[in-house]
Image (tube, rainbow, N blue to C red):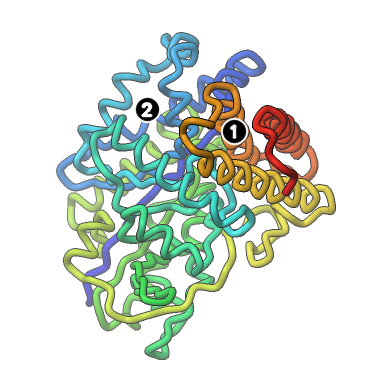
Amino acid sequence: MPDIGHALGFHMHQPPGNLELLWHTDEWEARQIMLCYQRPIMYAQAYRDHGCFHVDFSGILLEQFLDPTVKGLYRDVVDIEEMLAGYAEAENIELLSTGYFHPVFPLIPTPDWEEHMQRSVDMMVEIFGRRPRGFWPPEMAFSMDMIPALVKAGFEYVVVDHVHVSPEEESLGEEDAAVHPYLARRGEVEITVVPRHRDISNAQESGLDPGWLVGQVQHWSTRIKRPALLTTWSDGENGGWFRQTAEEAGFWGHFYAPYMESIHRGAYLLRPTLISRYLSEHPAHHTAEVRTGAWNVGMTGGFDFAQWAGSPTQKAVLKEVWHASQDYRYLRHHLDSLPAESRRAGEPEELVRSAHEDILRAETSCYFFWGDTWTPKARELVESAKQKLQRARQVLGAPEK
């Protein structure tokens, strides 16, 4: 029987300003969500000897954690500073990064990718004192074109949905292919891709049972001839399963605690592991192509990004985002090309910088996920960016593009 590692992971994200908004509009839900961020620390400490898992945070969620207003609102729910310190100190939690404002990377302008990636890394280093080695694509939206940007940002591996992974060098069954890391290359640059098992991850999000999990693994384990890595990942704060305040009825009490007890007794063939640890023991050697796509949400399979760009309104707003990003880069180039003695300091520089911030915020996937309901939030930010860029152009006397 081959060694089968289990990499368990949780994705954490809230769109800009949402923690404060939730507190004022639905305090009970806000409390439930905040406890979801604290609970992993409790269980990491309780099972530090034989349990481990992964957590990724969006930069904008971490930004909200640092907001004094948010800290004050939630002070009787969670001590946020203490919680963040717990993540920093937990050696059995591997922290991953994701896009700062949680964009669907294949749908936004390529020049904006680096900003989202690097700012997230910088935020995690600032808060946790560790540089993330892995990357979780927001909405699991991945394209092979992202590889050079990921490597430039210092990432060693990226988690992708297993249904998009096609091994190149060998003929494997779907289950076998779903539980092995691969190398993916774009030009001369390569990165390790770690397939996230879609089916078992879906169960993790809504009601995973330890016995069922082991049964699934036993079903296909006899066909695996080499060490394998089962990676399961889901949102860590969405749905009643994670927000359940009755501890024994939620994910951590119903699944994780009994799972860890059984692991401790040696009852399961799975071995909890961290991805970086597994890759150091079993580096990827075989290559794979990863089809552009996202995870499955609602009635969509994630192959065409219909959830985020399926309606005429969604497409129109994304087009506006692209145009605003192009305008920003034109004006940024113009500003940077001016001689130091003739560059007008102050207002133009601040306007251009602020416009760029608006554009990056407008790329938040949440503004597109809910059909046309939240697209006005993105459009409002784009309009703000356009006005700032127009004002900067007038002050600088810059020609139209």
Q: Is residue 286 visible?
A: yes
Confirm or deny contact between disc 2 and disc 1 (CB under 8 A). no
Q: Is residue 146 above or below residue 365?
A: below
Q: Is residue 83 left or right of residue 23?
A: left
Amino acid type, label 2: Gln
Marks 2 and 1 sit apart, C-alpha to C-alpha, by 38 Å
* Residue 32 at x, y percent in the picture: 51, 24
- Mark 2 or mark 1: which comes first in sequence? 2
Residue 370: percent from left, percent from top: 72, 43
Estimate the x, y position of residue 57 in percent, counting from the top left.
42, 39
Counting from the top left corner in percent of width and height, residue 3 is at 22, 70
Query: From the viewer's perspective, is residue 128 above or below residue 272?
Result: above
Q: Which residue is mark 2?
A: 38
Residue 163's disc number: none
Crowding near pointer 2: few (<14 within 10 Å), some, many (20+)?
A: some
Work out whether 53 lies above or below 129: below
Q: Residue at x 70, y 46 (%)?
A: 321
Q: Is residue 212 visible?
A: no
Q: Which residue in the protein does label 1 denote?
A: 352
